[in-house]
Image (cartoon, rainbow, N blue to C red):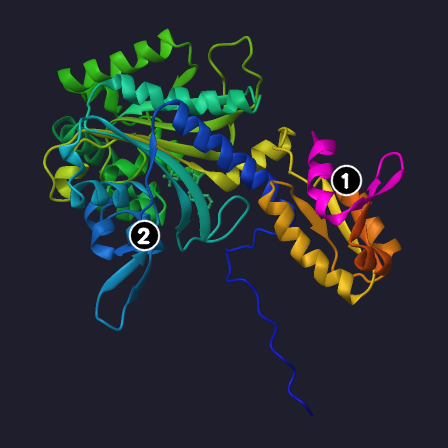
Amino acid sequence: MPKKKKSFQAPKGTFDILPSAQNVWETLRFTASRLADDFSYRRIDTPIIESSQLFETSVGTATDIVQKQMYTFKTSGGDVLTLRPEGTAPVARAYIENGLYNQPSPQKFFYMGPMFRYEQPQSGRFRQFHQFGFEVIGDEDPIYDAQLVQMIFALFDDFKITNLMVKVNSIGCKKCRQTFRNALIKYYKPQAKHLCKDCKTRLKDNPLRLLDCKDEKCIKVRSGSPQILDFLCGGCRKHFTEFLEILDEIEIRYTLDPYLVRGLDYYTKTVFEFFISNEENKDSRLPKSSSGPAIGGGGRYDDLYHLLGGRNTPAVGLAIGMERMMSIMQKNDVKLIAKKFPPVFLAYLGVPAKRKVIKLLSQLRHAGIVAGESFGKTSIGAQMKVADKIGAFYTVILGQKEILDNTAIIRDMHSGMQETVPRAKLIEVLKKRLG
Ligand code: AMP
């Protein structure tokens, strides 16, 4: 019995982006890049692989990302590398490594690309997913925290989606967070037996994360827990108040969420996450509740650059999950960027004409005319059907006679009128017709 051939599948939690889905991807990529340009954020691209230590040092060893989700491997040269699980640490590494601090501050960056996390795949959660993000490096002014939030509202506005909401909180600086941490441990310790398994570990490793656990039991315990805002030092309180005042000033709706902590070690002060609200927000300034998972989030990381061996550099940034964003775009019937279709189609009859067509395609391209073809179909009828389907305005037909005469037939696909022109004049005539 011949062995059955193995059929391959994309690895669990990954997916192909097929041509039929490219339109929505391109619309999001284009709109996000334009947003970056509009707000003077410059594109930066970093490698997909980084040293594992970069994430251990910045994201933190007590986080889910580092403990459970990194794709880490040893190269044959002995380096331990990780497929990037997030974009902020790589940008920080690039900033320090390339001495970008020598340029005027703040510097504003935009990145976009795939990220990798070994998670349990489910709706809206993948192992390879995509994010775009913005980073402002070298300024502590909360106006930048607010500008980032403003940009995401502007993006949703561009897509005419009105029910975006943002949850905000401050987790303070190292100093005030330490006092809060102690208060949390004091509150949670006697109730440890009521917590889920993960939270029992978090109580030891990362008590702040106790606050954003989604387990019913833990949510119950949380209801009486101390709140970070009561522990903020003078500086952090002022920073947060200013941030909220600016949001008010630019008329951004926000919801204070004392349990929002963002989990990663590098955050300080402002944190925020974006959701879709259950309600339209046209009239009401304060959305009541969110539905579904976060679309994106971010915050300030004033200690990150120091952690990575750079000088003290305040910074703030955010990342948006592109798959989640696109699912919202599709639910809201966002108008997609129209795909450019070729205005001209080249049809042929016979092998010599087919060879002329491949040459002609390139000549038309040089003249700035986009043309389609269907080399795989031999009958003129089948080729005309393709021309119709792609919406070509004109079809150029080359048959045996036209090859001998050095002419071409131009067919107006709308009226059906045909004209024979000398081949030497073809480009000139087409250009005139296409205007
Ligand atoms: P985070 O910084 O982890 O909050 O991620 C920012 C955003 O990226 C999230 O709000 C999601 O939209 C998206 N994201 C994070 N992890 C995944 C994942 N495993 N699959 C799909 N999207 C994700």
Is 316 colored magenta in this rendering? Answer: no
Q: Is residue 300 left or right of residue 160?
A: left
Q: Is residue 107 above or below residue 246?
A: below
Q: Is residue 311 above or below residue 62?
A: above
Q: Is residue 392 left or right of residue 336?
A: right
Which label number is shown at residue 47?
A: 2
Q: Nearer the viewer, residue 133 or 183?
A: 133
Where is residue 100 shown, x and y percent of the image? Answer: 18, 37
Q: Is residue 382 visible?
A: yes
Q: Which residues are magenta?
A: 410-435
Where is residue 189 shown, x and y percent of the image? Answer: 23, 39
Q: Is residue 221 visible?
A: no
Quarter of the picture containing the N terminus is: bottom right
Ligand 1 lies under 8 Å from the Cβ of mark 2: no
Q: Is residue 81 above or below residue 314?
A: below
Is 422 colored magenta in this rendering? Answer: yes
Residue 247 sits in quarter: top left
Residue type at the position of mark 1: Gly
Residue 168 sits in quarter: top left
Could you tell me which residue is drawn at 52 percent across and 43 percent down? 124
Front tag of 2 and 1 = 1
Where is residue 373 shown, x and y percent of the image? Answer: 73, 53
Could you tell me which residue is drawn at 86 percent across and 56 percent down? 380
Q: Considering the numbered disc 2 on the image, is that residue within a helix, a strand or a loop?
A: loop
Quarter of the picture containing the C terminus is: top right
Q: Is residue 23 left or right of residue 68?
A: right
Inter-mark Cα distance, 2 to 1: 40 Å
The residue at which mark 1 appears reads as 391
